[in-house]
């Protein structure tokens, strides 16, 4: 296996490999998340589509690797690892931190005359909009953990174990550094691909207006879907979310017929 292929397998593993797939859905998890977030997704996707999940340093088999704390260098490295997967149509889905990473990677690929057939952003306001929730990445451990608990996005077995917290907390905090220090500073025209945004009706980290503002980031079609739940409606409303994504993918001819 070449060095690039090894990097691709490390950065973008496939929970259920499908080498003959005609298209790919590439997913970007929320802060602290990884491959397990999307473990149940492959079964709900079209049979000719492969799921790939971005796996950042600091979790899973990459637990001991140095973590990124700035978005631009992360996008540069991730873009290189993604290159072997651009041999067929693909779409991006990102939740919370993942929405920003998916968006920035789509912009980076656009500069190379590449890009996703569809961009799905979830659980985050548009990059030009100030986030409605206060930053938490600089809080002391006890307060930071309480904020994470309040979001209901990390398993209780981790949050209630000092040993497990010592393992996972650094990656979660570094992800929040990425999320909360990100600034939309790159100029350029909007993306040309359609954008679908998803939000939770009870999510304190977004607003409907902030989600609607994603419309300005594309010259293509835009739709906003509001689902029941808080910030982690990606878990509580998984079936509805995946169903909406699949409907859009099936309607995007480039993703299923090329």
Image (cartoon, rainbow, N blue to C red):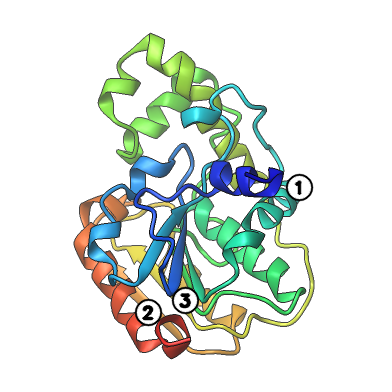
Is mark 2 in CB contact (under 8 Å) with mark 1? no
Q: Which residue is mark 3?
A: 212
- Whether 208 is drawn above or below 183: the answer is below
Residue at 54%, 20% (x, y): give it.
140
Q: Which residue is mark 1?
A: 73
| Mark nearer the N terminus (2 vs 3) | 3
Is residue 152 shown to the viewer in this render? yes
Residue at 40%, 9% (x, y): give it.
163
Structural distance between the alpha carbons of marks 3 and 1: 28 Å
What label does residue 249 carry, if any? 2
The one nearer the camera, 225 or 114, is 114
Q: Residue furthest top?
A: 163
Structural distance between the alpha carbons of marks 2 and 3: 20 Å
**Residue 66 sits in which quadrant?**
top right
The one nearer the camera, 158 or 45, is 45
Residue at 52%, 43% (x, y): give it.
55
The one nearer the camera, 88 or 207, is 88
| Mark nearer the N terminus (3 vs 1) | 1
How far across and how far down the image is residue 229, in percent? Answer: 24, 56
Dot 2 falls on a residue whose secondary structure is helix
| Mark nearer the N terminus (2 vs 1) | 1
Dot 3 falls on a residue whose secondary structure is helix
Q: Residue furthest front?
A: 1
**Residue 164 sits in which quadrant?**
top left
How far across and how far down the image is residue 172, in percent? Answer: 50, 32
User: Which tag is nearer the camera, tag 3 or tag 1?
Assistant: 1
The quarter of the picture where the N terminus appears is: top right
User: Which tag is nearer the camera, tag 2 or tag 1?
Assistant: 2
How far across and how far down the image is residue 158, in percent? Answer: 33, 22
Is residue 227 shown to the viewer in this render? no
Dot 1 falls on a residue whose secondary structure is helix
What label does residue 120 carry, if any? none
């Amino acid at each position: 296996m070449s060095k690039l292929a090894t990097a691709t397998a490390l950065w973008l593993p496939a929970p259920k490999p499908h080498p003959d797939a005609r298209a790919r859905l590439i997913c970007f998890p929320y802060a602290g998340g990884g491959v397990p977030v999307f473990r149940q997704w492959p079964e709900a996707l079209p049979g000719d589509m492969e799921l790939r999940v971005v796996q950042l340093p600091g979790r899973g088999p990459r637990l001991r690797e140095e973590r990124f704390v700035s978005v631009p260098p992360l996008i540069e490295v991730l873009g290189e690892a993604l290159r072997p997967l651009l041999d067929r149509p693909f779409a991006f889905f990102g939740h919370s931190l993942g929405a920003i990473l998916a968006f920035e990677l789509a912009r980076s690929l656009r500069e190379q005359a590449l890009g996703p057939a569809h961009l799905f952003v979830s659980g985050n306001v548009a990059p030009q909009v100030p986030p409605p929730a206060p930053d938490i990445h600089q809080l002391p451990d006890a307060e930071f953990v309480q904020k994470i608990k309040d979001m209901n996005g990390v398993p209780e077995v981790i949050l209630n174990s000092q040993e497990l917290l010592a393992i996972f907390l650094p990656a979660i905090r570094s992800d929040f550094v990425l999320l909360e220090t990100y600034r939309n500073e790159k100029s350029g025209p909007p993306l040309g691909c359609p954008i679908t945004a998803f939000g939770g009706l009870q999510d304190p980290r977004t607003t409907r207006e902030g989600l609607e503002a994603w419309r300005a980031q594309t010259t293509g079609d835009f739709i906003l879907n509001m689902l029941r739940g808080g910030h982690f409606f990606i878990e509580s409303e998984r079936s509805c979310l995946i169903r909406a994504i699949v409907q859009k993918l099936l309607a995007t001819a480039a993703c299923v017929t090329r």
